């Protein structure tokens, strides 16, 4: 929590000043007290009050004063608030391991289907971009509201060699920079701005879906720091199981740089070696943590669909400083009036009852 007018918090001194004044008045009252012949008679004449009845109104009143004094500083809280529109850059791994059949028919086919559903479920006005990465990363679709363009690019994804996760992040940053003037391109020196300089996030988000670990290019953590410096969040998804499985892909999923290569058994329905999952969950978690995003793990089609379906709740929120002065004022008024009311109620004079003579 922060304060727009921190200098106004000097009003908090009113509470200790009142406590000192109360102590001083009590001390004077004791010095000027009269000596009476029978203390018992005076005690009997006064209404009985327990110690907690004397203290609770005072505590409530002082707490109310503290809340009102705090309100004078215009407190702000960093809260998650919804965005009206956002740009989402989908970065999808198309390395050769995406043809592994541990998730039938293979990882690329399932990931493509899940990505299609994700695009179709986005609100109108949200812009979607697509980055495909293997040994290199390429921007297939700049952020656009035309879902058909993105769906067509997803249908055309083909596998190739290598996994350049870091380069995919940098490519996504540059794509966002082209449409958002508040986001600098990766080659721009940010000076002393530093990561998350303003404490809030840009409405644009990067989603990285991969089944492997970075094998070439820039380190993913280095790229993530570039995103964090631009207040861009990255959500990472690790896809696939730990079970060994054959690598099989259809002809339309193979590019000239596929691990199977031209003339390989992949000409019809490709058949490669046995692959284990080489997912680097530690690196993906680090990327998400650096940028304020989250890491998700999905081992089958249903889990991947659930992850992508839940993403809009996280993507559609960003942290923003929201003024909460009104809540301090309401709490202060409620506490002070409650304390004053209890004091009046408990200290009221006892009613006199007339007895017949």
Image (cartoon, rainbow, N blue to C red):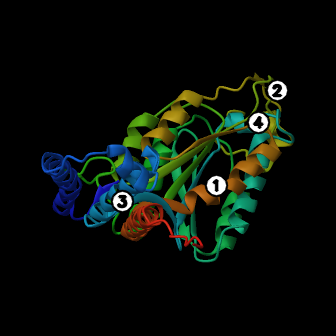
Cα distance in 3D space between marks 3 and 2: 70 Å
The crowd level at tag 3 (other Cα within 10 Å; few <14, some 14-19, many 20+) is many
The crowd level at tag 2 (other Cα within 10 Å; few <14, some 14-19, many 20+) is some
Residue at coordinates 59% horizontally, 30% vertically from top-left? 281
Give the number of marks. Answer: 4
Which one is earlier in the sequence, the residue at label 2 or at label 1? 2
Residue 261 visible? The answer is no
244 relative position to 7: left or right: right
The residue lying toward the viewer, choosing from 53 and 127, is 53
Q: Nearer the viewer, mark 3 or mark 2?
A: 3
> Is the residue 16 above or below the residue 82 in the image?
above
Residue at coordinates 37% horizontally, 44% vertically from top-left? 40
In the image, farthest residue toward the front = 357
Dot 3 corresponds to which residue? 61
Q: Nearer the viewer, mark 4 or mark 3?
A: 3
Cα distance in 3D space between marks 4 and 1: 17 Å
Quarter occupied by residue 273: top right
Q: Disc 3 on helix, strand or loop?
A: helix
Dot 1 corresponds to which residue? 311
Dot 4 corresponds to which residue? 299
Cα distance in 3D space between marks 2 and 1: 29 Å
> Is the residue 85 above or below the residue 214 in the image?
below
List x then y, in percent, for residue 262.
Answer: 71, 38
Dot 2 corresponds to which residue? 245
19 relative position to 279: left or right: left
Which one is earlier in the sequence, the residue at label 2 or at label 4? 2
Q: Disc 4 on helix, strand or loop?
A: loop
């Amino acid at each position: 929590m922060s304060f727009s007018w921190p200098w106004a918090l000097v009003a908090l001194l009113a509470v200790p000043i009142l406590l000192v004044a109360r102590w001083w008045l009590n001390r004077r009252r004791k010095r000027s007290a009269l000596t009476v012949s029978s203390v018992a008679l005076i005690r009997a004449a006064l209404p009985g009050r327990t110690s907690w009845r004397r203290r609770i109104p005072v505590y409530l009143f002082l707490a109310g004063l503290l809340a009102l004094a705090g309100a004078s500083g215009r407190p702000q809280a960093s809260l998650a608030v919804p965005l009206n529109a956002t740009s989402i850059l989908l970065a999808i791994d198309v390395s050769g391991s995406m043809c592994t059949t541990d998730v039938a028919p293979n990882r690329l086919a399932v990931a493509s289907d899940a990505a299609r559903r994700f695009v179709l479920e986005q609100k109108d006005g949200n812009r979607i971009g697509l980055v495909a990465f293997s040994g290199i990363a390429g921007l297939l679709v700049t952020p656009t509201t035309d879902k058909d363009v993105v769906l067509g690019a997803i249908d055309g994804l083909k596998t190739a060699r290598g996994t350049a996760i870091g380069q995919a992040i940098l490519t996504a940053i540059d794509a966002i920079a082209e449409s958002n003037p508040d986001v600098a391109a990766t080659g721009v020196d940010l000076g002393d701005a530093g990561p998350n300089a303003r404490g809030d996030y840009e409405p644009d988000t990067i989603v990285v879906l991969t089944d492997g670990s970075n094998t070439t290019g820039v380190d993913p953590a280095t790229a993530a720091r570039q995103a964090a410096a631009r207040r861009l969040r990255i959500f990472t998804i690790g896809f696939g199981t730990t079970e060994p499985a054959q690598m099989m892909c259809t002809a339309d999923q193979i590019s000239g740089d596929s691990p199977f290569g031209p003339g390989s058994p992949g000409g019809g329905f490709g058949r490669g070696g046995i692959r284990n999952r080489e997912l680097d969950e530690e690196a993906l978690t680090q990327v998400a943590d650096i940028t304020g995003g989250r890491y998700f793990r999905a081992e089958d089609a249903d889990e991947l669909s659930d992850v992508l379906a839940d993403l809009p709740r996280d993507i559609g929120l960003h942290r923003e400083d929201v003024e909460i002065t009104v809540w301090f004022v309401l709490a202060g008024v409620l506490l002070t009036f409650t304390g004053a009311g209890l004091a009046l109620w408990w200290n009221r004079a006892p009613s006199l009852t007339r007895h017949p003579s």
